[in-house]
Image: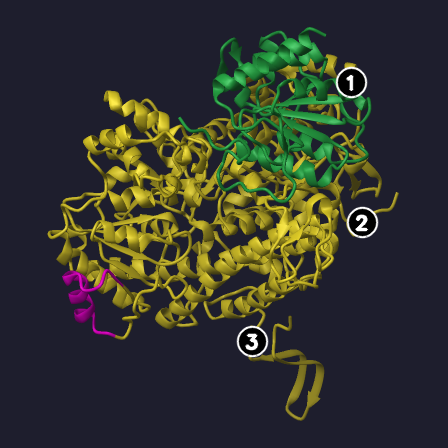
Amino acid sequence: MPKKEFVIKIKDLKTDIGILKDFELSIGKIIEEWEEEAGPTEFPTIKDLREWDFKLLQRYRPFYMPFCDVCCLCTFGKCDLTGNKRGACGLDMSAQQSRIVLLACCIGAATHIAHARHLLEHLIEKYGSDHPIDVGGINVEVEAPITRLVCGIKPRKLGDLEDVLDYLERQVTQLLSATHTGQEGSNLDFESKVFHAGMIDQVGMEVADIAQIAAYGFPKADPDAPLVDIGFGTADPTKPVILVIGHNVPPAIEIIDYLTENGLYDQVEVTGLCCTAHEITRYNPKAKIVGPISWQLRFIRSGVPDVIVVDEQCIRADSLIEAQKVKAPLIATSDKNCLGLKDRTNDPADAIVSDLLSGKTPGVLILDPAKAGEVAVRTAIGVAHKRKKFKAIPETSDIIESAKRCRRCDECRRACPNDLPIPEALAATIEGNLDELSSLYDECVGCARCESACPLGFPLHSFIVKAAERKLKEERYKVRAGRGAIQDVEIRRVGGPIVLGEIPGVIAFVGCANYPHGGKEIAEMAMEFAKRRYIVLTSGCAAMSAAMYKNEEGKSPYEIHPGIFDAGGIVNVGSCVANSHIAGAVIKIASIFARRKLRGNYEEIADYIHNRVGAVGVAWGAMSQKAASIASGFWRLGVPVIVGPHGSKYRRMLLGRKDRKEDWYVYDARTGEKVYVGPTPEHLFYAAETKEEAMVMIAKLCMRPNDTTKGRSIKLTHYIDLHRRLYGTMPDDIHLFVRTLADVPITMRDEIVKILEEKGWEQNIVPDPTLLPRLIRRRG
Amino acid sequence: MRMAKSTEPWMTAEIPGPKKALVITKPKVVSAIIRRAKRPLLIVGHEAVEIELKEGRLIDYMIRLAEAAEIPVVATAHIQGEFQRRGFKPASWMPAVDIANRLVDSEWMGLGDEGRHDLALFVGLPYYMGWLILSGLKHFSPDLKTVSLDMHYQPHASWSFPNLSIEEYEKNLRVILEELEGD
């Protein structure tokens, strides 16, 4: 993409008035102020990084698990693709599956990019296009590492980001067009485009988050960002309560501003669900997070929120129906989520408030954030005293009566994503035992499919919530508000220990809340690895779940562990779009610590990360298309991602084969020699069946070819220790990760040496690893 | 109590495509399939440790089956130690998606490089995960026959039990074991 619409370059001009050298004039677009030489892939097209993608895909081959045997995307269909048959258009099953993955990632990327555009337009209107991008003061010089890497520009002010979004929107359109009938035909080319979608998604997330950090004054790379309240029980129901749900924060900010400007803040509770909840606490630490996405129904039905304000993404499509059940007025604020409501944007606030208070309308669409903020506050204050008695949670006697009528047809259980034994638990209530029903709460993902399936129309989700009433009220924890970027100085401090392997890994717990056994597994994993002195990062719903745990002293993980990007830290970067700071941190390790050129130099930076930075993403409850595109951005950077068992429904894994020795060679950049480095890391995308399996795999996937012997020894210690504890045995592949005897942990030396002898292990060298022949310094 | 119809997927919406598993109406069919196979493989997921049956847990039944029919076992998830605690050593342990990925590779010569497997029996994976893995094998491993030994119908297998009550399921397993142990 041309960065400038009109460029004049003059090397040497002699005129009557003087001599002009190296003059460059650009009109219409970004004026560069970056001394670094331009890299090979600035603003890459959808095929520019194909060669790099194919290197990864050759090692991590796709394994497809079709979710559907047919294709129904055109009028030839349905086409039966069973057994890799070809459809009427000529596409086979593997290409069809990768096409669907690409569609999912395009949806995810488009969602973040559209969010970024919406947000940026609002912020430019409010703060001006010259508003400077400051995400960390003097602690953050590399303000936009992904944008610099991908686009080759240094954005200085909000207006600069518009050019970046222009590029991203063009890419999404082209990627989406490749999914049309009769376009791409190769599954590997579809996969390369999936990686491209992930890469531009990361840029889109970065644009959104640096813009809002700069404009709203969110914590700026602050390891001591305030601890804020999280949990169902933190909201004070005696006050009017406003609930905000979604991801795009301007309407919620306007609510807070209206309350503050009118001296009302202490009289009204502002609570949030999903990422908008993260954002409001980044803006005002007094705001409260109710919980992750799966808390939507339970909180609305409790009747606590008096007004519900929804913006965009991950909001239940039936939010208006649920709001009506508890007589809570709903305000929709995004043109992407109008919910069939009348557009009242241009009506006077007084008239809208009056209609909501009188019940003339159950909800309104207001696309002006400031007006939505004012209407939300005034409506909450006006309606609160009228509707306190409304809630949709039944009484215990209703549950018992329903249990007596239950036909035990199992339809609820067969609809439940986690196969929870709802009929059995309901039957137990007849004897007055609500404990079984209450125990389901811990693993319920809050989808309410059980209710839709019940032929008698029982509100089964509400039954579970009622049975667990006490637990809900006791849900009071602390989470550190999203800190945003990682400081350059932090990167300088830990870059060496990470690349050498002495900090055993950087583990990011990200994504949604579709957990197989509840959110506590996230907290347990995060605590375990923080205790082991890994660097633990969190974001989105996973950051919330990580908080919802208490130790014997009543402290949550964020109170026990510091928010610093260093060994033993648990670092909440923020919302979904703050995932960009996780990618940004690994990129900055390559550019700031290792001084690799950043500008438009994607392939080299990704090669560096893949071979040297022991980072692993864990999306234990990944559910959405956004989660798919977030993961694919990490794949192109060479960072492995683990999903929970529900993540198998993304229908495609990227799996290495440790038994194929030929797959695990790299070049030694010093000599050009090809060196076997073992399966490091073994997989690029993989679904674990259990938490225990995931924990062992996390430790294993942190190993990288570049680890020093000391670093490898530390990483092996954790891998073996976790394997012994959780599997009850020694791993059977230790010999693949030992390069020299100095890699062997001293405390297990005799035992491991014996294993190495049995396996016929041979000593190898530790190379200066790269997959790119052009980076070989001297030919052997 | 009304069970789901025998050949409906246990999870209501997990509708397969045109090719669906044959239903194992008699447990003896399983022992016959195993006997006919040249290189069978038994893949056991973590739920085998959680499911309680009359004479022990499901994993105990699977150990008996593996010993009686001399089938190598791949333990998935973290249950390898559970086998060893019971005095049984699985042939291998690896993630469920890993063994499936090997089974679709026409060049993979099986566990111990002793030849391609022609039969894979699955048990104890979460239903939806088993559903997807069996789908991958159905589409991309045309020479492999698969059997689901779980108590719910798995449409992507070559053969599957129908949806069974736990009592019926246990009885079926017992018949299979008695058949194989009598050999």
Task: Classify mark 1: residues with Cα within 10 Å, few (<14), some (14-19) or many (20+).
Answer: some
Amino acid marked by disc 1 = Lys
Res A207 seen here? yes
- Tell me the quarter of the picture where residue A30 sits: bottom right
N-term mark: 1 or 2: 1
Q: Which chain is yellow?
A: A
Residue for point 43% across, 71% down: A130
Callouts 3 and 1 in the same chain: yes
Callouts 3 and 2 in the same chain: yes
Task: Classify mark 3: residues with Cα within 10 Å, few (<14), some (14-19) or many (20+).
Answer: some
Q: Is residue A362 magenta?
A: yes
Q: Which residue is mark 3?
A: A29
Q: Which residue is mark 1?
A: A759
Task: Give yes or no for contact between labels 3 and 1 (Cβ–Cβ under 8 Å).
Answer: no
Q: Look at the picture and state if A522 lies above or below A88.
A: above
Find chain B in the image and tell me its colour.
green
N-term mark: 3 or 2: 3
Label 2: chain letter: A
Q: Look at the picture and state if A358 lies above or below A407.
A: below
Left or right of A215 on screen, residue B12: right
Instruction: Measure the alpha-carbon separation of dots 3 and 2.
Output: 35 Å
Left or right of A166 on screen, residue A132: left
N-term mark: 3 or 1: 3
Give the position of the N terminus of chain B as an image quadrant: top left
- Tell me the quarter of the picture where residue A554 sits: top left
- Tell me the quarter of the picture where residue A549 sits: top left
Magenta part of the chain? A347-363
Q: Kindly report which numbered mark, 1 or 2, lies closer to the viewer in this rendering.
A: 1
Q: Kindly report which numbered mark, 3 or 1, lies closer to the viewer in this rendering.
A: 1
Label 1: chain letter: A
Residue reaching furthest to the bottom: A16
Q: Name the disc covering residue A773, or none.
A: 2
